[in-house]
Image (cartoon, grey):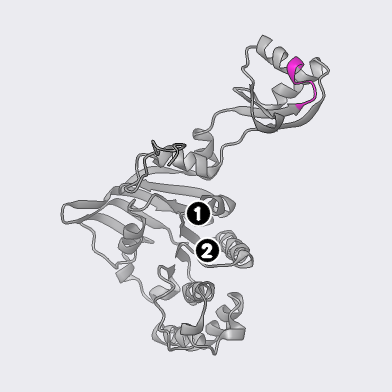
């Protein structure tokens, strides 16, 4: 199967360096989330991989070759960069037929991807009548048209309803299980956490992280637990005696840094304190991502110094 390989990739626009000596590989059999703040270089990198822009230095290859050297590229690489790019006066079916004919793809694939993307019932409608979510499905249908080994999707959930979001999530996982190489650029951390196996994170054109998702989250997590109990003073005192510092929050919920739920449970059992709630505190992908990229965004907003003041 084909991999995406980027080596010392650099792109300058005049004095601005959009991509700064990037090196990474996107392998088959997993969904790789491609993350970073606005201006991090994600879209530029994808354009460089696809030969839509020329690098200042370095290389971006697919199966060891640049995109321009691939034979029947639509059958090797499926891409969604801009769902609004389809001609509005064409029908969905005719848009896909034009792509199939120009790329030597059988017409039967058009009908198959229309079914797969849920567009069969509206295939004869003009694209300009489509909602954003329908256009997004059409863009995904075009990406799947050549039954490619590599799929690159930029914000694939954009405009989709909840049913559509579940569908695209399952589709990406299914493609990875089939051994395809799947690269997905997104700003939606909660959604990315539901489908990605691996993460590549950029900041100001540089590589910040290239790790399995669980490993990335764990690397930026602190151990902790939360609990609720009817004997909060007894459990608090018992934990303090053992060197912990429990902190009471809203709703009677306590948190303890540096201890897992199992340890808290053992202390509660030893003290015969009943527990109403007990769980490990887990860092989310969003929290870990923000911890890494806080100072890497071109558009970060300073905390307001006037919050709480009366007009």
Left of 251 or right of it: where is 16?
left
Q: Are marks 2 and 1 in contact (CB under 8 Å)?
A: yes
Q: What is the magenta range? A: 229-234
Task: Residue 15: say if magenta.
Answer: no
- Choose top left, top right, bottom left or bottom right for residue 232: top right
Residue designated by label 2:
157
Q: Is residue 114 left or right of residue 74?
A: right
Query: Furthest-front residue in view?
Result: 311
Q: Residue at x 53, y 44 (%)?
A: 285
Residue 6, image x and y in percent? 33, 54
- The picture places residue 251, in percent across and down from the top left corner, at 70, 33
Is residue 171 in sight in this rendering?
A: yes
Q: CA gap, disc 2 to disc 1?
A: 9 Å
Q: In percent of the image, x 54 and y 60: which residue is there? A: 179
The spot of residue 84 in percent (x, y) is 42, 75
Q: Kindly identify which residue carries mark 1.
A: 188
Q: Secondary structure at mark 2?
A: loop
Relative vertical location of residue 310 with respect to residue 42 in this rendering, above or below: above
Sort mark 2 into few (<14), some (14-19) or many (20+) by Cα contacts within 10 Å.
many
Q: Residue at x 77, y 20 (%)?
A: 268
The quadrant the C terminus occupies is top left
Image-based side of 26 in relation to 251, left or right: left
Who comes first in sequence, dot 2 or dot 1? Answer: 2
Which residue ends up furthest to the top in the rendered image?
241
What secondary structure is marked by label 1?
Answer: loop
Between 301 and 238, the residue placed more toward the observer is 301
Please indicate, yes or no, whether residue 106 appears anywhere in the rendered image: no
Position in image of residue 293 (x %, y %): 40, 41
Q: Residues within 10 Å of mark 1 (few under 14, many from 20)?
A: few
């Amino acid at each position: 199967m084909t991999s995406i390989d980027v080596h010392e990739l650099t792109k300058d626009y005049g004095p601005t360096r959009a991509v700064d000596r990037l090196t990474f590989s996107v392998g088959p059999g997993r969904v790789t989330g491609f993350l970073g703040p606005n201006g991090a270089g994600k879209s530029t990198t994808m354009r460089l991989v696809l030969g839509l822009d020329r690098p200042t230095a370095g290389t971006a290859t697919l199966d060891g070759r640049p995109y321009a050297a691939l034979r029947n590229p639509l059958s090797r690489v499926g891409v969604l960069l801009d769902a609004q790019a389809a001609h509005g006066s064409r029908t969905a079916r005719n848009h896909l037929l034009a792509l199939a004919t120009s790329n030597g793809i059988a017409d039967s694939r058009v009908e198959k991807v229309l079914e797969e993307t849920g567009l069969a019932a509206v295939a004869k409608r003009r694209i300009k009548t489509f909602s954003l979510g329908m256009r997004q499905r059409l863009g995904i249908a075009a990406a799947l048209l050549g039954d490619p080994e590599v799929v690159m999707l930029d914000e694939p959930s954009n405009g989709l309803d909840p049913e559509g979001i579940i569908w695209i999530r399952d589709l990406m996982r299914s493609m990875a299980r089939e051994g395809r190489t799947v690269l997905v650029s997104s700003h939606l951390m909660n959604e990315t956490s539901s489908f990605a196996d691996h993460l590549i994170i950029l900041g100001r054109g540089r590589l910040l992280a290239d790790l399995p998702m669980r490993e990335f989250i764990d690397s930026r997590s602190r151990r902790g637990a939360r609990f609720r109990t009817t004997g909060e003073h007894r459990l608090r005192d018992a934990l303090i005696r053992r060197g912990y510092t429990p902190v009471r929050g809203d709703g009677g919920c306590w948190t303890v840094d540096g201890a897992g739920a199992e340890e808290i449970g053992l202390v509660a059992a030893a003290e015969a304190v009943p527990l109403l709630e007990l769980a490990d505190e887990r860092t989310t992908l969003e929290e870990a991502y923000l911890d890494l990229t806080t100072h890497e965004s071109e558009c970060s907003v300073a905390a307001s110094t006037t919050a709480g003041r009366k007009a």
